[in-house]
Amino acid sequence: MSLAEKVRLAGVVGAGGGGFPTHVKLNAKAETVIANGAECEPLLHKDAVIMEESAAELVRGMQLAIEAVGAKEGVIGIKGKKKHAVAAVQAASKGTNVRVQLLGDYYPAGDEYDLVYNVTGKLIPPGGIPIAVGVVVNNVETFVNIAAAHDGKPLTHKTLTIAGAVKSPATLRVPIGMTFRECIEYAGGLTTDDPVLVIGGLMMGTHTDNLDTPITKTSTGVVILPRTHHTIERKIKPAKMQAKIGKSACDQCRYCTEYCPRFLLGYAVEPHQVMRTLAFSGTGEDYFNQWAAMCCSCGLCTLYSCPEELFPKEACDDAKSMMRAKQMKWTGPMNPKPHAMLDGRRVPIKTLAKKLHVLDYDLPAPLLRQEISSHRLTLPLKQSAGTACISKVKTGDRVAAGQVIGEPAPNALGAILHAPMAGTVREANDKHIILEK
């Protein structure tokens, strides 16, 4: 059986937040395999913990992937400041066809376009993906899961960081389907009476006040902050209000564009031009929305560079949605050339954390080594890019740990879902499966 098939049967998806089914990437042919260990989101530490604790499995997963795609080498991209993780992966990769490349401590060093350029010197074609330049990129946790899949172990648990307004920030390994409420208790409990969860990190994450939101295969961590925190106040502002403020206040200063990491790499991303659609909707909207096509939604323009605290990232998100709805493709320049100020305009993580007003929360989040379990798991049937799974169980069924409980439709893009524990199905519908011990 091929590695790609073993990975498909194990239900492995991108663990860095994207959730793309990993078996698809392993069916490609590439020259270089890159492990993304940049971990740029302030306060999150799960990738560093994984590299410290599972360096050997990371390297083994990379070697398996290298063989599967016919690559010449593997590269682990990791920030030089993460000294313990660097030491662990350097020791594990010694004498192998995997090497370590140190990255600067800036945001977003983990953007695939930026990472591929730093490692290979190649620029991904506008609108393209890494394989277009002979590269396969996966998160470091994904490679650990590839090694497990090779050994016949399905993906049933997730490593994530619990940070922010908790008593003891921690990194946990938990069963998929466990709630953030339960995870927070393992981090000592909340230090705020009115928490808002930003799942996936302050820059690119989604916010909710529902503590019972379940952990999924793509959960990288959560930052909890009080509702009155300035960054939270900005994030929860209604979309119509964001657009109204931008329409009245944007003075086209270009800071959002001049700090944009994709613009600095040479791509035609200009958020200040997209902001014009707020005022000129209906007259040139299609033209101005094109400037958002290559936006990676890193959030730097909204949360760092805009001096008036407007919402260019959200304007770009809306523009991309409009382009998808109209089935518009990028028609602009296809020959990116890095900006002369690329290195000079990098945004240091410490500077970003200060801008976000979270320096007081910038604390270690060590791995909690105890075994963590739950008596009740809520398992969404969609936990990857592509389509949702179809439930393979019904209410009242008893299932074994590791049993397949959901599968995508035949030939559809998606990822198989397994039971993280033995138990009884309390509910099964087209949205989720609830499993109890």
Image (tube, rainbow, N blue to C red):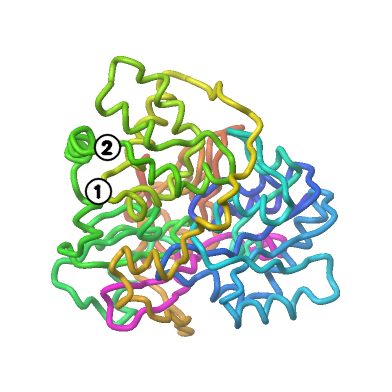
User: Which residue is depicted at the point 24% across and 48% down?
Assistant: 308
Residue 101, image x and y in percent? 70, 66
Residue 148 falls inside the magenta stretch: yes
Is residue 1 in view from this perspective? Answer: no
Under mark 1, the amino acid is Glu
What separation in Å lies between label 2 and label 1 (alpha carbons)? Answer: 9 Å
- Crowding around mark 1 (Cα neighbors within 10 Å: few <14, some 14 to 19, many 20+) is few
Q: Which residue is mark 2?
A: 251
Q: Which residues are magenta?
A: 146-175
* Residue positioned 71% across, 37% down in the render: 132
Looking at the rendering, which quadrant does residue 54 occupy?
bottom right
Q: Which mark is residue 308?
A: 1
Amino acid type of the residue that numbered disc 2 sits on in the rendered structure: Asp
For residue 423, above or below residue 434: below
Pointer 2 local density, CA inside 10 Å: few below 14, some 14–19, many at least 20:
few
The residue depicted at 69 percent of the width and 75 percent of the height is 89
Q: Give left or right: position of 307 versus 137.
A: left
